[in-house]
Amino acid sequence: MKKLNKYCQVVINTIAESSEFRFNHLLSFLVIALPLIFMVLLWRKVLGENGQIGAFDLKSIITYYFLVVLFQDISYPGPFWEIIDHIRDGGLNVFLSKPISYPGYILALKLGINIPYLFQSALILVALGMVAGFSRYLILPIDLFHFLFSLLSFLLAVLCGFSLSFIFSALTFWLEEGRGVEVFLEFLISLSSGLVLPVSLYPKALKTFCNILPFRYVLNFPIELYLGVVKGRELITGLTIQILWVLLAFLVLRFIWKSGLKKYEAVGA
């Protein structure tokens, strides 16, 4: 219980600190949010008011990109620069001497940053939608069942995205310069996560490929579940795969972390 209180305190302190940088949050979010207006204009041109592509009509496709922008920073896998810097400059030693799990600390830090960001982003997006005139296209879940399962799926997406991000960052133990790997991962993740286009709209072979990878389940799957695009057996299968990826990613995280620490401590010695 005491350990849990330590992580909760990290979350609270980070939320308090992040509130001092609201203007920076606003600027960084606007850089991401403004392309949403472009996507709205694009899909209005492609579909018109009554058009449809796959399981998406104009309202559902706009809601899809709305949720992509809202949750992208929270669950989308990417490098944790704190981890990379701590490994490279030796700052990791400070945490290894404390009675706290470093992965747990980073998770608490991420939650402390993302919780206020989520609420601020939602308010900005709604205001932006009202000003730009696309808020009328946003839709609610088709029923309570899909809403509750989408909440569960979003939570799993955050955990999976965190584990993948930690794994990518911990590769710094072995890679002096990982820019090439980073560029490849950025391309693969943006393609298979549904960041650019809903995975259900991909050709069958590409869709099957994306279904195998974990990245679809950190962004695309929870959103398509929310919209009711994923139903019935596909819903159960998708949630099962998502849970398995969360567990596997956590196990890989532990292995990478322990192996990396051995190398780090050996070099330090």
Image: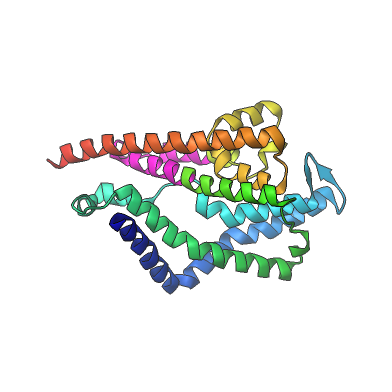
- Residue depicted at 39% across the width and 66% down the height: 12
Residue 19 located within the stretch drawn in magenta: no
- Residue depicted at 68% across the width and 47% down the height: 146
Give the colouring mode of the picture.
rainbow
Residue 84 visible, this orientation: no
- Outermost residue toward the top? 205
The answer to which of 56 and 32 lies nearer the viewer is 56
Residue 216: % across, % down: 58, 39
Left or right, 205 with respect to 41, comes to: left
The image quarter in which residue 265 lies: top left
Left or right, 159 with respect to 7, comes to: right
Most common secondary structure along the magenta stretch: helix
The answer to which of 64 and 4 lies nearer the viewer is 4
- Residue depicted at 47% across the width and 68% down the height: 24
The answer to which of 145 and 57 lies nearer the viewer is 145
Residue 163: % across, % down: 42, 43
Give the extent of the magenta segment: 161-187
- Residue depicted at 16% across the width and 37% down the height: 266
Residue 165 located within the stretch drawn in magenta: yes
Residue 220: % across, % down: 62, 43
Instruction: Relative to 148, say whether 16 is above or below.
Output: below
Residue 97 visible, this orientation: yes
Residue 175: % across, % down: 32, 37
Q: Quadrant of the C terminus?
A: top left
